[in-house]
Image: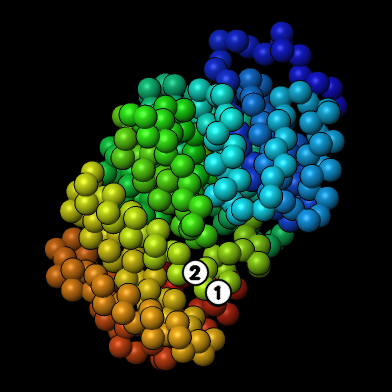
Amino acid sequence: MNNINENKINKEYPKISIIVPIYRAEKELPRCIESIINQTYKNLEIILINDGSPDRCGDICERYSIQDNRIIVINKLNGGVSSARNAGLDIATGEYIGFIDADDWVEPEYVEFLYKLAAKSSADISICGHYVHLAEDNIIERNKVINEMLTPDEAIYYAIRGTYFDGYVWNKLFARHLFFQNNIRIRFDEKLHICEDLYLVCCCIATANNIVYSPKPFYHYMIRPDSATNLYSEKVITKLEAYSNIIQLLEQVSCDKNVDLAKMRYTQFAIDIRRMALEANDKVMIKHIKKQEYKYMKDVLRSNFIIGKEKLRIWYMHFFPRSSIKIWSFLKKRLKISCLIWE
């Protein structure tokens, strides 16, 4: 593999920074890095953040940085994925910024497609479809069709609902200026361990001029058994902290429909955490989380924007959590994936 000759990069295309947070991914990391360096779009700044990974990830990053002079390696103490992404944002110089997770990979046209999609529509955020890999022989294509151009309210609704595209950062390309608004730096909240993506995405969408979406899938998302979203721990409570932040944000910048949707998701997640706490016989969490379930319950049940079926589901899961555990166990076995039954 040879270094990229700067003279061969088409200067008509702006520099795009790709930030990769890395922790315990030595098996998947080479595939990820090679999928980035082999992009058809060449004017890249590839920022690899070794977040104190105890395996060989640091050595792998250094090896690739010698082979490709577009790669910048940062070695830091472990601080979590938000801390790693923020470290990348702090040094990124591209006019657009994208994020790729170390255990995922992208199609060769990923960056070029997202850039041209944004440029054609003068959009601050461009979004593509993606594949979900549950196992080597189990792939789901997430590429439903909606209108290509979206208003901020529409994009926030779809990001929270997860109907067409999710609130992750990795299938999106962001204009640089979104992270530097009126002397305020938008960054990932490092206290959050789950849904940190969604909060930042909502912040960026709220200040974006245009958002453009295409269902064509260019990103490969790998679900790992040890993913933070699949494991029950005290960290799962930060999902509610993320949604509290989102609700506060939307009450200032978005429509009532999106505020009620965020309150519904908060209530759903609180109920789901209690279900997990019941399975784990975590009495302290059960007592704490029941209070959180009531926080927006009345608002949700009285909302004109939430359909009766969803209200009924919330009511049933709240009052009959133990029978819902049986339903959950059946769905988990049937679907062969640990995911929220609300999705």
Residue ID at (49%, 69%): 236
Residue depicted at x 71% and y 30%:
72
Q: In this figure, which residue is indicated by the disc labeled 2? A: 236
Instruction: Name the mark on residue 285.
Output: none
Query: Within 10 angstroms of label 2, few (less than 14), some, or many (20 or more) residues?
Result: many
Q: What's the CA distance linking mark 1 and mark 2?
A: 6 Å
Residue 255 versus residue 204 in the image, above or below: below
Give the image location of residue 265, x and y in percent. Answer: 34, 65
> Quick one: SS at disc 1?
loop
Q: Quadrant location of the N terminus?
A: top right
Image quarter where the C terminus lies is: bottom left
Identify the element where label 2 is drawn.
helix
Where is residue 222 drawn, in percent x and y?
64, 55
Question: 76 above or below 36?
Answer: below
67 in relation to 206, above or below: above
**Residue 308 visible, this angle:** no
Amino acid under disc 1: Ser
Residue drawn 31% across and 40% down? Answer: 206
Give neighbour class at mark 1: few <14, some 14-19, many 20+ (Cα, 10 Å): some
Q: Where residue 66 sits: x, y (%)?
A: 83, 28
Along the viewing direction, whichever of 180 and 40 lies nearer the viewer: 180
Query: In the image, 75: left or right of 269?
Result: right
Q: Residue at x 20, y 54 (%)?
A: 257
Q: Circle 1 is placed at which residue position?
A: 233
Say whether residue 174 is visible: yes
Q: Are marks 1 and 2 in contact (CB under 8 Å)?
A: yes
Q: Amino acid at mark 2?
A: Val
Rendered image quadrant of residue 10:
top right
Image position of 254 (left or right of 127): left
Q: Nearer the viewer, residue 185 or 325?
A: 185
